[in-house]
Image (tube, rainbow, N blue to C red):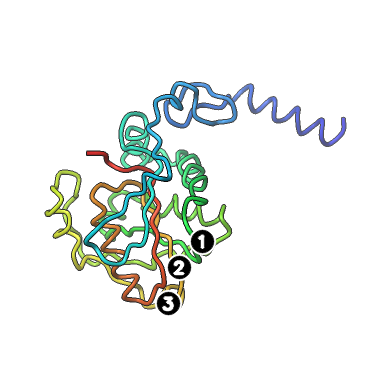
Amino acid sequence: MSRSSLKRFLEYLVSFFYPARCPLCDQFSARCVACSSCKESLSVLDAPAVFLVAGFGGLDRCISCFAFDGVVKDAIHRFKYSGELSLRDYFASQLFKRLPDLPDFDVVVTVPMHKNKIVKRGFNQAALIAASVARRAGKKFCHGALVRISDGASQTQLQRTERIASVKGAFNIDDSAQENIKNKKVLIIDDVTTTGATICECAKVLKKAGAEKIYALTLARTIA
């Protein structure tokens, strides 16, 4: 048996005993992509629907892939709170597809979690996705470039003005990351944005550290 034939045979065995599943609903689906039912239910946010945040300095552009509802919301919650880390690659692939909608960039950073929350959860979901996107794009991932210095309450139940107040002064730049940020075009990656307060606060810190341009890309956005 030739090497190519052996490879196809082994792939067949793997697919037979471990059939691919839809990453969103876990139903059987070819090549581990979203099934047709989930694809139809996705609320895709087109490139023209750019989420620009007025009144907050620093952020030059922000795009989100999906509306934060339905199967996307459920999958993100499973990823964050139930530790279904297998969703990382699917999420990263969806973000990677949207990179052409943004200007070119030099480095990738992520919205940080406070160390207390990382200890409790065990991982920063945004960092896992961002590292995968950076690798696919062939860009440098500056892990830990942004640091959360205050452990504020969860923002899920806060109103817009409360969200803005809760993240003010909450972030800083790690000293070791300064040279990777100064005069660079930086892409911030996060899982979900609602008012944009957190990303904009991160952008302010990056601009203060000398970043030339700051873009943001999130997996989902809460639609009012």
Label 1 is placed on what type of residue?
Answer: Asp
Is the C-beta separation of discs 1 and 3 under 8 Å? Answer: no
- Residue drawn at 17 percent across, 54 percent down: 163
Q: Which quadrant holds residue 24?
A: top left
Label 2 is placed on what type of residue?
Answer: Lys
CA separation, marks 2 and 1? 8 Å
The x and y percentages for residue 192 are 32, 46
CA separation, marks 3 and 2? 9 Å
Q: Secondary structure at mark 2?
A: strand
Q: Is residue 123 visible?
A: no
Is the C-beta separation of discs 2 and 1 under 8 Å? Answer: yes
For disc 3, the neighbor class at 10 Å (few under 14, some 14 to 19, many from 20) is some
The disc at residue 104 is: 1
Horizontal side of 182 relative to 116 (left or right) equals right
Q: Is residue 197 visible?
A: yes
Which residue in the structure is indicated by mark 3?
182
- Residue drawn at 23 percent across, 50 percent down: 195
Which residue in the structure is indicated by mark 2?
185
